[in-house]
Amino acid sequence: MSASPDDAQFMQEAIRLGLLHLGQTSTNPSVGCVVVRDGTIVGRGTTAVGGRPHAEPQALAEAGELARGATAYVTLEPCSHHGKTPPCADALISSGVSRVVISVTDPDERVSGRGIAMLRDAGITVETGLMEKEGRHSLAAYLTRQTKNRPYVILKLAVSADGMIGRKGEGQISITGPAARAEVQTLRAETDAILVGIGTAIADDPELTVRIPGMQARSPVRIVLDPLLQLPEASKLVKTARDVPVIVVGSEESSLPEMDEPGLPPSVLPDISPTRGEIDSQRASSQAVDVGTSGRAQPISPPVGEMPGRAEGGNSTSDADDTATTDLEARHQALEAAGVEVVYCNPYRPDVLLPALASRGISSLLVEGGAKTARLFLDAGLVDRILLYQGPGSIGNGGIETPIRKTDISSDFRHVGTRIVGDDTLDEYEREV
Ligand code: AOF
Ligand code: ZN
Protein backbone atom coordinates (compact mmCIF):
# COMPACT_ATOMS: atom_id res chain seq x y z
CA MET A 1 0.00 0.00 0.00
CA SER A 2 1.06 3.56 -0.62
CA ALA A 3 0.69 5.06 2.84
CA SER A 4 2.40 8.36 3.50
CA PRO A 5 3.41 9.78 6.91
CA ASP A 6 0.33 11.97 6.61
CA ASP A 7 -1.82 8.89 6.20
CA ALA A 8 -0.43 7.50 9.45
CA GLN A 9 -1.09 10.77 11.22
CA PHE A 10 -4.71 10.88 10.05
CA MET A 11 -5.28 7.24 10.95
CA GLN A 12 -3.81 7.99 14.36
CA GLU A 13 -6.46 10.68 14.74
CA ALA A 14 -9.20 8.25 13.63
CA ILE A 15 -7.98 5.75 16.24
CA ARG A 16 -7.95 8.45 18.91
CA LEU A 17 -11.55 9.36 18.00
CA GLY A 18 -12.60 5.71 18.12
CA LEU A 19 -11.20 5.34 21.62
CA LEU A 20 -13.39 8.19 22.88
CA HIS A 21 -16.45 5.96 23.21
CA LEU A 22 -14.68 2.80 24.27
CA GLY A 23 -17.03 0.76 26.44
CA GLN A 24 -20.06 2.86 25.53
CA THR A 25 -21.09 1.35 22.21
CA SER A 26 -21.28 -2.37 23.02
CA THR A 27 -22.00 -4.59 21.20
CA ASN A 28 -20.99 -2.31 18.37
CA PRO A 29 -17.33 -1.35 18.11
CA SER A 30 -16.36 2.24 18.78
CA VAL A 31 -15.01 3.24 15.38
CA GLY A 32 -13.26 6.48 14.48
CA CYS A 33 -13.35 8.27 11.13
CA VAL A 34 -11.78 11.41 9.73
CA VAL A 35 -12.39 13.01 6.35
CA VAL A 36 -9.38 14.85 4.95
CA ARG A 37 -9.42 17.39 2.16
CA ASP A 38 -6.14 18.84 0.88
CA GLY A 39 -4.29 17.84 4.03
CA THR A 40 -6.88 19.28 6.39
CA ILE A 41 -9.40 17.37 8.51
CA VAL A 42 -12.85 18.53 7.46
CA GLY A 43 -14.96 15.92 9.26
CA ARG A 44 -14.65 13.78 12.36
CA GLY A 45 -16.83 10.96 13.65
CA THR A 46 -16.94 8.42 16.47
CA THR A 47 -19.56 5.67 16.70
CA ALA A 48 -22.20 7.28 18.91
CA VAL A 49 -22.79 6.19 22.50
CA GLY A 50 -25.18 3.22 22.29
CA GLY A 51 -23.66 2.15 18.95
CA ARG A 52 -25.42 4.33 16.41
CA PRO A 53 -25.10 6.35 14.29
CA HIS A 54 -21.87 4.83 12.99
CA ALA A 55 -18.73 6.94 12.70
CA GLU A 56 -18.67 7.56 8.95
CA PRO A 57 -22.03 9.33 8.40
CA GLN A 58 -21.17 11.71 11.22
CA ALA A 59 -17.77 12.57 9.76
CA LEU A 60 -19.32 12.95 6.30
CA ALA A 61 -22.10 15.17 7.62
CA GLU A 62 -19.52 17.48 9.14
CA ALA A 63 -17.50 17.53 5.91
CA GLY A 64 -20.56 18.22 3.74
CA GLU A 65 -19.63 19.14 0.18
CA LEU A 66 -15.94 19.15 1.13
CA ALA A 67 -16.09 15.35 1.16
CA ARG A 68 -16.13 15.32 -2.63
CA GLY A 69 -12.72 14.12 -3.78
CA ALA A 70 -11.51 13.79 -0.17
CA THR A 71 -9.93 10.83 1.65
CA ALA A 72 -11.74 9.08 4.50
CA TYR A 73 -9.72 7.28 7.19
CA VAL A 74 -11.64 4.66 9.13
CA THR A 75 -10.45 2.34 11.89
CA LEU A 76 -12.84 -0.44 10.77
CA GLU A 77 -14.01 -1.48 7.32
CA PRO A 78 -17.19 0.50 6.57
CA CYS A 79 -20.31 -1.61 6.92
CA SER A 80 -22.09 -2.97 3.87
CA HIS A 81 -25.27 -4.23 5.52
CA HIS A 82 -28.64 -2.68 6.13
CA GLY A 83 -28.66 -3.08 9.89
CA LYS A 84 -30.15 -0.53 12.21
CA THR A 85 -28.69 2.10 9.93
CA PRO A 86 -28.01 2.10 6.16
CA PRO A 87 -24.60 0.88 4.98
CA CYS A 88 -21.72 3.27 5.65
CA ALA A 89 -20.16 2.13 2.38
CA ASP A 90 -23.17 3.68 0.56
CA ALA A 91 -22.80 6.89 2.57
CA LEU A 92 -19.12 7.10 1.55
CA ILE A 93 -19.96 6.42 -2.10
CA SER A 94 -22.66 9.07 -2.29
CA SER A 95 -20.49 11.62 -0.49
CA GLY A 96 -18.08 11.56 -3.42
CA VAL A 97 -14.91 10.65 -1.48
CA SER A 98 -12.27 9.36 -3.86
CA ARG A 99 -10.15 7.35 -1.45
CA VAL A 100 -10.85 5.34 1.70
CA VAL A 101 -8.08 4.17 4.02
CA ILE A 102 -9.02 1.39 6.45
CA SER A 103 -7.05 0.04 9.38
CA VAL A 104 -8.88 -3.22 10.21
CA THR A 105 -11.20 -5.36 8.09
CA ASP A 106 -14.50 -6.25 9.77
CA PRO A 107 -14.95 -9.89 10.88
CA ASP A 108 -18.74 -9.38 11.14
CA GLU A 109 -20.05 -11.92 8.66
CA ARG A 110 -22.53 -9.38 7.29
CA VAL A 111 -19.62 -7.16 6.27
CA SER A 112 -16.28 -9.03 6.04
CA GLY A 113 -14.85 -7.70 2.78
CA ARG A 114 -18.17 -6.60 1.29
CA GLY A 115 -17.70 -3.04 2.49
CA ILE A 116 -14.37 -2.86 0.69
CA ALA A 117 -15.81 -4.47 -2.44
CA MET A 118 -18.71 -1.99 -2.57
CA LEU A 119 -16.32 0.95 -2.37
CA ARG A 120 -14.00 -0.45 -5.04
CA ASP A 121 -16.92 -1.30 -7.32
CA ALA A 122 -17.91 2.35 -7.09
CA GLY A 123 -14.45 3.38 -8.32
CA ILE A 124 -13.10 4.48 -4.95
CA THR A 125 -9.45 3.75 -4.18
CA VAL A 126 -9.33 1.59 -1.06
CA GLU A 127 -6.27 0.84 1.05
CA THR A 128 -6.37 -1.47 4.05
CA GLY A 129 -4.14 -2.42 6.96
CA LEU A 130 -2.81 1.02 7.84
CA MET A 131 -1.65 1.02 11.50
CA GLU A 132 -3.37 -2.31 11.85
CA LYS A 133 -1.74 -3.20 15.16
CA GLU A 134 -2.94 0.02 16.78
CA GLY A 135 -6.31 -0.29 15.05
CA ARG A 136 -6.82 -3.82 16.34
CA HIS A 137 -5.82 -2.70 19.79
CA SER A 138 -8.46 0.02 19.73
CA LEU A 139 -11.11 -2.50 18.61
CA ALA A 140 -9.84 -5.38 20.78
CA ALA A 141 -13.07 -5.99 22.69
CA TYR A 142 -15.20 -6.08 19.54
CA LEU A 143 -12.74 -8.25 17.62
CA THR A 144 -12.39 -10.72 20.49
CA ARG A 145 -16.13 -11.14 20.90
CA GLN A 146 -16.62 -11.47 17.14
CA THR A 147 -13.82 -13.94 16.47
CA LYS A 148 -13.44 -15.81 19.78
CA ASN A 149 -17.01 -15.65 21.02
CA ARG A 150 -15.92 -14.31 24.39
CA PRO A 151 -15.15 -10.94 25.96
CA TYR A 152 -11.66 -9.42 25.87
CA VAL A 153 -10.26 -10.11 29.34
CA ILE A 154 -8.06 -7.66 31.22
CA LEU A 155 -6.48 -8.81 34.45
CA LYS A 156 -5.54 -6.01 36.80
CA LEU A 157 -3.38 -6.60 39.84
CA ALA A 158 -1.90 -4.24 42.41
CA VAL A 159 1.19 -5.81 43.95
CA SER A 160 3.29 -4.57 46.88
CA ALA A 161 7.08 -4.27 46.74
CA ASP A 162 7.31 -7.68 48.43
CA GLY A 163 4.98 -9.35 45.95
CA MET A 164 1.70 -9.34 47.90
CA ILE A 165 -1.77 -8.30 46.78
CA GLY A 166 -3.25 -7.89 50.25
CA ARG A 167 -3.12 -9.07 53.83
CA LYS A 168 -5.25 -11.94 55.07
CA GLY A 169 -8.30 -10.87 57.02
CA GLU A 170 -7.75 -7.15 56.52
CA GLY A 171 -10.08 -6.33 53.68
CA GLN A 172 -9.07 -3.59 51.30
CA ILE A 173 -5.65 -2.12 51.87
CA SER A 174 -4.02 0.50 49.69
CA ILE A 175 -1.16 -0.86 47.67
CA THR A 176 -1.16 1.75 44.94
CA GLY A 177 -1.67 5.49 45.19
CA PRO A 178 -4.35 7.86 43.90
CA ALA A 179 -2.95 8.16 40.36
CA ALA A 180 -3.08 4.40 39.77
CA ARG A 181 -6.51 4.17 41.35
CA ALA A 182 -7.76 6.93 39.05
CA GLU A 183 -6.45 5.01 36.03
CA VAL A 184 -8.32 1.92 37.16
CA GLN A 185 -11.49 3.99 37.50
CA THR A 186 -11.11 5.09 33.88
CA LEU A 187 -10.48 1.51 32.83
CA ARG A 188 -13.69 0.43 34.57
CA ALA A 189 -15.58 3.10 32.66
CA GLU A 190 -14.23 1.68 29.39
CA THR A 191 -15.17 -1.89 30.24
CA ASP A 192 -18.52 -3.66 29.93
CA ALA A 193 -18.18 -5.86 33.02
CA ILE A 194 -15.96 -6.36 36.05
CA LEU A 195 -15.49 -9.65 37.88
CA VAL A 196 -14.30 -10.72 41.34
CA GLY A 197 -14.41 -13.95 43.33
CA ILE A 198 -16.59 -14.27 46.40
CA GLY A 199 -13.48 -14.26 48.62
CA THR A 200 -12.62 -10.73 47.48
CA ALA A 201 -16.26 -9.65 47.58
CA ILE A 202 -16.51 -10.71 51.23
CA ALA A 203 -13.06 -9.68 52.43
CA ASP A 204 -12.88 -6.30 50.67
CA ASP A 205 -16.55 -5.37 50.38
CA PRO A 206 -15.77 -3.47 47.18
CA GLU A 207 -18.29 -1.41 45.24
CA LEU A 208 -16.56 -1.84 41.85
CA THR A 209 -18.26 1.22 40.40
CA VAL A 210 -16.91 4.24 38.56
CA ARG A 211 -16.78 7.16 40.93
CA ILE A 212 -15.25 9.76 38.63
CA PRO A 213 -17.61 12.77 38.80
CA GLY A 214 -19.87 12.79 35.77
CA MET A 215 -18.91 9.27 34.75
CA GLN A 216 -20.83 7.27 37.38
CA ALA A 217 -23.30 6.10 34.75
CA ARG A 218 -20.46 4.28 33.02
CA SER A 219 -20.01 1.75 35.82
CA PRO A 220 -19.59 -1.75 34.45
CA VAL A 221 -21.90 -4.65 35.22
CA ARG A 222 -20.49 -6.32 38.34
CA ILE A 223 -20.07 -10.07 38.40
CA VAL A 224 -19.24 -12.21 41.44
CA LEU A 225 -18.15 -15.85 41.14
CA ASP A 226 -20.09 -17.13 44.10
CA PRO A 227 -20.70 -20.90 43.95
CA LEU A 228 -22.64 -21.05 47.21
CA LEU A 229 -24.43 -17.70 46.99
CA GLN A 230 -22.59 -16.27 49.96
CA LEU A 231 -22.58 -12.64 48.90
CA PRO A 232 -23.79 -10.83 52.05
CA GLU A 233 -26.96 -8.83 51.75
CA ALA A 234 -25.23 -6.05 53.67
CA SER A 235 -22.40 -5.85 51.13
CA LYS A 236 -21.95 -2.69 49.09
CA LEU A 237 -22.44 -4.73 45.94
CA VAL A 238 -25.88 -5.93 47.00
CA LYS A 239 -26.88 -2.57 48.43
CA THR A 240 -26.13 -0.83 45.14
CA ALA A 241 -27.50 -3.59 42.90
CA ARG A 242 -30.53 -1.55 41.88
CA ASP A 243 -28.31 1.24 40.59
CA VAL A 244 -25.60 -0.79 38.84
CA PRO A 245 -26.37 -4.40 37.87
CA VAL A 246 -24.83 -7.22 39.89
CA ILE A 247 -24.74 -10.78 38.58
CA VAL A 248 -23.94 -13.56 41.00
CA VAL A 249 -22.69 -16.73 39.33
CA GLY A 250 -23.65 -19.72 41.45
CA SER A 251 -22.69 -23.31 40.81
CA GLU A 252 -25.25 -25.47 39.23
CA GLU A 253 -25.00 -29.12 39.99
CA SER A 254 -24.78 -30.05 36.37
CA SER A 255 -21.89 -27.69 35.76
CA LEU A 256 -19.58 -28.89 38.50
CA PRO A 257 -16.48 -30.39 36.93
CA GLU A 258 -17.06 -33.94 38.13
CA MET A 259 -20.54 -33.89 36.59
CA ASP A 260 -19.31 -32.67 33.20
CA GLU A 261 -20.08 -34.82 30.25
CA PRO A 262 -17.49 -34.34 27.58
CA GLY A 263 -18.95 -33.23 24.30
CA LEU A 264 -21.95 -31.50 25.77
CA PRO A 265 -22.32 -27.88 24.80
CA PRO A 266 -21.54 -25.53 27.65
CA SER A 267 -24.43 -24.16 29.61
CA VAL A 268 -24.88 -20.44 29.23
CA LEU A 269 -26.44 -17.60 31.10
CA PRO A 270 -29.92 -16.36 30.27
CA ASP A 271 -30.31 -14.33 27.15
CA ILE A 272 -31.15 -11.12 28.94
CA SER A 273 -28.68 -8.31 28.75
CA PRO A 274 -28.05 -6.35 31.90
CA THR A 275 -25.55 -4.25 30.00
CA ARG A 276 -25.84 -0.74 28.79
CA GLY A 277 -25.24 -2.31 25.42
CA GLU A 278 -27.31 -4.87 23.72
CA ILE A 279 -27.21 -8.35 22.40
CA ASP A 280 -27.23 -9.27 18.82
CA SER A 281 -30.27 -11.43 19.40
CA GLN A 282 -29.67 -13.70 16.46
CA ARG A 283 -26.14 -14.48 17.56
CA ALA A 284 -27.16 -14.81 21.17
CA SER A 285 -29.97 -17.23 20.54
CA SER A 286 -27.87 -19.36 18.25
CA GLN A 287 -25.29 -19.63 21.02
CA ALA A 288 -27.68 -20.06 23.89
CA VAL A 289 -27.71 -23.79 24.24
CA ASP A 290 -28.81 -24.49 27.74
CA VAL A 291 -30.05 -21.73 29.91
CA GLY A 292 -28.90 -22.03 33.49
CA THR A 293 -31.65 -19.79 34.59
CA SER A 294 -32.79 -18.41 37.91
CA GLY A 295 -34.97 -20.07 40.50
CA ARG A 296 -33.12 -23.34 40.35
CA ALA A 297 -30.97 -23.39 43.43
CA GLN A 298 -29.84 -26.96 43.76
CA PRO A 299 -27.98 -29.07 46.23
CA ILE A 300 -24.39 -28.23 45.56
CA SER A 301 -21.34 -30.30 46.24
CA PRO A 302 -18.37 -28.70 47.94
CA PRO A 303 -16.66 -26.31 45.55
CA VAL A 304 -13.97 -27.78 43.42
CA GLY A 305 -10.79 -25.76 43.38
CA GLU A 306 -10.56 -23.70 46.49
CA MET A 307 -12.65 -20.66 46.96
CA PRO A 308 -11.88 -18.41 49.89
CA GLY A 309 -13.61 -18.35 53.27
CA ARG A 310 -17.32 -18.59 53.77
CA ALA A 311 -19.54 -15.79 54.81
CA GLU A 312 -20.78 -15.76 58.37
CA GLY A 313 -23.90 -17.81 58.67
CA GLY A 314 -22.93 -19.74 55.58
CA ASN A 315 -24.20 -23.23 55.32
CA SER A 316 -21.81 -26.05 56.11
CA THR A 317 -21.13 -28.28 53.14
CA SER A 318 -21.65 -31.29 55.39
CA ASP A 319 -25.30 -30.41 55.94
CA ALA A 320 -27.93 -32.66 54.52
CA ASP A 321 -28.73 -31.96 50.88
CA ASP A 322 -32.27 -30.80 51.49
CA THR A 323 -31.16 -28.31 54.13
CA ALA A 324 -28.54 -27.03 51.73
CA THR A 325 -31.15 -26.69 49.01
CA THR A 326 -33.51 -24.73 51.20
CA ASP A 327 -30.70 -22.54 52.38
CA LEU A 328 -29.47 -21.87 48.86
CA GLU A 329 -32.95 -21.16 47.69
CA ALA A 330 -33.43 -18.73 50.54
CA ARG A 331 -30.18 -16.97 49.64
CA HIS A 332 -31.14 -16.92 46.01
CA GLN A 333 -34.50 -15.31 46.89
CA ALA A 334 -32.86 -12.80 49.20
CA LEU A 335 -30.33 -11.75 46.58
CA GLU A 336 -33.00 -11.44 43.91
CA ALA A 337 -35.22 -9.45 46.24
CA ALA A 338 -32.32 -7.02 46.64
CA GLY A 339 -32.07 -6.60 42.86
CA VAL A 340 -29.18 -9.00 42.23
CA GLU A 341 -29.43 -11.34 39.28
CA VAL A 342 -28.53 -14.92 40.18
CA VAL A 343 -27.45 -17.22 37.39
CA TYR A 344 -26.13 -20.73 37.46
CA CYS A 345 -23.08 -21.64 35.53
CA ASN A 346 -19.82 -23.34 36.31
CA PRO A 347 -17.85 -20.67 38.20
CA TYR A 348 -14.60 -22.62 37.81
CA ARG A 349 -14.73 -22.79 34.05
CA PRO A 350 -13.98 -19.40 32.51
CA ASP A 351 -14.16 -21.16 29.14
CA VAL A 352 -17.85 -21.80 29.83
CA LEU A 353 -18.63 -18.53 31.56
CA LEU A 354 -17.01 -16.19 29.04
CA PRO A 355 -19.03 -17.28 25.96
CA ALA A 356 -22.12 -16.97 28.11
CA LEU A 357 -21.18 -13.39 28.95
CA ALA A 358 -20.45 -12.68 25.29
CA SER A 359 -23.90 -13.92 24.35
CA ARG A 360 -25.30 -11.27 26.67
CA GLY A 361 -23.44 -8.54 24.85
CA ILE A 362 -20.45 -8.26 27.16
CA SER A 363 -17.40 -7.57 24.98
CA SER A 364 -14.86 -6.66 27.64
CA LEU A 365 -14.27 -7.96 31.13
CA LEU A 366 -12.00 -6.61 33.83
CA VAL A 367 -10.89 -9.26 36.33
CA GLU A 368 -10.03 -7.46 39.55
CA GLY A 369 -9.49 -10.16 42.11
CA GLY A 370 -8.44 -11.99 44.05
CA ALA A 371 -5.47 -14.28 43.64
CA LYS A 372 -7.50 -17.44 42.99
CA THR A 373 -9.79 -15.85 40.48
CA ALA A 374 -6.80 -14.39 38.66
CA ARG A 375 -5.15 -17.83 38.61
CA LEU A 376 -8.34 -19.39 37.27
CA PHE A 377 -8.36 -17.12 34.24
CA LEU A 378 -4.59 -17.29 33.72
CA ASP A 379 -4.53 -21.09 33.89
CA ALA A 380 -7.35 -21.27 31.38
CA GLY A 381 -5.29 -19.10 29.01
CA LEU A 382 -8.17 -16.64 28.93
CA VAL A 383 -6.42 -13.40 29.80
CA ASP A 384 -5.68 -10.99 26.95
CA ARG A 385 -4.03 -8.17 28.81
CA ILE A 386 -2.31 -7.94 32.19
CA LEU A 387 -1.94 -4.68 34.08
CA LEU A 388 0.53 -5.17 36.88
CA TYR A 389 0.67 -2.14 39.16
CA GLN A 390 3.47 -2.21 41.69
CA GLY A 391 3.35 -0.01 44.78
CA PRO A 392 6.41 1.07 46.80
CA GLY A 393 5.28 -0.30 50.19
CA SER A 394 5.68 -3.78 51.64
CA ILE A 395 2.96 -5.89 53.23
CA GLY A 396 5.14 -8.25 55.23
CA ASN A 397 3.70 -10.96 57.44
CA GLY A 398 0.28 -12.33 56.62
CA GLY A 399 0.46 -11.18 53.03
CA ILE A 400 -1.47 -12.81 50.21
CA GLU A 401 0.99 -13.65 47.48
CA THR A 402 0.47 -12.34 44.00
CA PRO A 403 -0.73 -15.00 41.57
CA ILE A 404 1.67 -13.67 38.95
CA ARG A 405 5.06 -11.99 38.92
CA LYS A 406 6.81 -10.13 36.14
CA THR A 407 9.26 -13.00 35.90
CA ASP A 408 6.67 -15.73 35.35
CA ILE A 409 4.39 -14.16 32.78
CA SER A 410 3.87 -16.56 29.90
CA SER A 411 5.87 -15.82 26.77
CA ASP A 412 2.56 -15.60 24.86
CA PHE A 413 2.38 -12.10 26.31
CA ARG A 414 4.28 -9.20 24.86
CA HIS A 415 5.65 -6.70 27.37
CA VAL A 416 4.08 -3.49 26.11
CA GLY A 417 6.06 -1.30 28.48
CA THR A 418 6.63 0.09 31.95
CA ARG A 419 5.14 3.40 33.05
CA ILE A 420 5.47 5.45 36.19
CA VAL A 421 2.05 6.22 37.66
CA GLY A 422 2.40 8.52 40.66
CA ASP A 423 4.56 6.60 43.16
CA ASP A 424 3.76 3.29 41.46
CA THR A 425 4.89 1.55 38.32
CA LEU A 426 2.69 -0.15 35.77
CA ASP A 427 3.85 -3.03 33.63
CA GLU A 428 1.54 -3.88 30.78
CA TYR A 429 1.46 -7.19 28.93
CA GLU A 430 -0.66 -8.10 26.00
CA ARG A 431 -1.50 -10.98 23.73
CA GLU A 432 -2.30 -10.65 20.04
CA VAL A 433 -5.98 -9.98 19.48
C1 AOF B 1 -19.19 1.03 10.58
N1 AOF B 1 -18.99 2.13 11.34
O1 AOF B 1 -18.98 3.18 13.29
C2 AOF B 1 -19.47 0.90 13.30
C3 AOF B 1 -19.62 -0.26 12.50
O2 AOF B 1 -26.36 -3.14 14.47
P1 AOF B 1 -25.79 -2.24 13.43
O3 AOF B 1 -26.66 -2.07 12.24
O4 AOF B 1 -25.32 -0.93 14.01
O5 AOF B 1 -24.47 -2.97 12.87
C4 AOF B 1 -23.48 -3.39 13.75
C5 AOF B 1 -22.28 -3.75 12.94
O6 AOF B 1 -21.80 -2.61 12.25
C6 AOF B 1 -21.09 -4.22 13.76
O7 AOF B 1 -21.11 -5.60 14.02
C7 AOF B 1 -19.95 -3.87 12.84
O8 AOF B 1 -19.86 -4.81 11.78
C8 AOF B 1 -20.41 -2.57 12.25
N2 AOF B 1 -19.98 -1.43 13.06
N3 AOF B 1 -19.46 -0.16 11.17
O9 AOF B 1 -19.15 1.09 9.35
C9 AOF B 1 -19.12 2.13 12.67
N4 AOF B 1 -19.64 0.88 14.65
ZN1 ZN C 1 -21.66 1.50 9.30
Image (cartoon, rainbow, N blue to C red):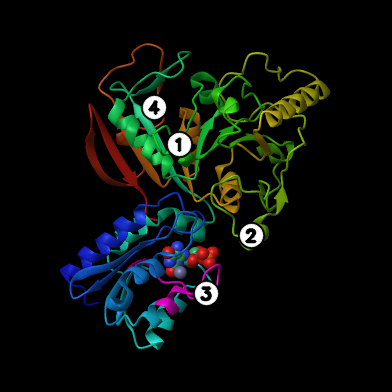
The reply to whether the C-beta atoms of the residues labelled 2 and 1 are less than 8 Å apart is no
Asked if the stretch drawn in magenta spans residue 223, the answer is: no
User: Residue type at mark 1?
Assistant: Gln
Front-most of 193 and 306?
193
User: Residue type at mark 2?
Assistant: Ser
The reply to whether the C-beta atoms of the residues labelled 2 and 4 are less than 8 Å apart is no
Task: Determine which residue is flagged by label 4.
Answer: 402
* Gap in angstroms between the C-alphas marked 3 and 2: 16 Å
Please state the extent of the stretch shown in magenta in the rendering.
73-91
Front-most of 228 and 260?
228
Marked residue nearer the N-terminal end (4 or 1): 1
Q: Which mark's residue is nearer the viewer, 4 or 1?
A: 1
User: Residue type at mark 3?
Assistant: His
Secondary structure of residue under mark 3: loop
Marked residue nearer the N-terminal end (2 or 4): 2
Give the quadrant of residue 240.
top right
- The disc at residue 81 is 3
The residue located at (23%, 39%) in the rendering is: 418
Secondary structure of residue under mark 2: helix
Front-most of 380 and 50?
50
Q: Position of residue 202 (x, y in %)?
A: 55, 21
Marked residue nearer the N-terminal end (2 or 1): 1
Q: Position of residue 57 (x, y in %)?
A: 41, 70
The residue located at (27%, 46%) in the rendering is: 416
Q: Which mark's residue is nearer the viewer, 3 or 4?
A: 3
Q: Is mark 3 within 8 Å of ligand 1?
A: yes
Q: Which mark's residue is nearer the viewer, 2 or 1?
A: 1
Front-most of 122 and 432?
122
Task: Determine which residue is flagged by label 1.
Answer: 216
- The disc at residue 281 is 2
Q: Which mark's residue is nearer the viewer, 2 or 4?
A: 2
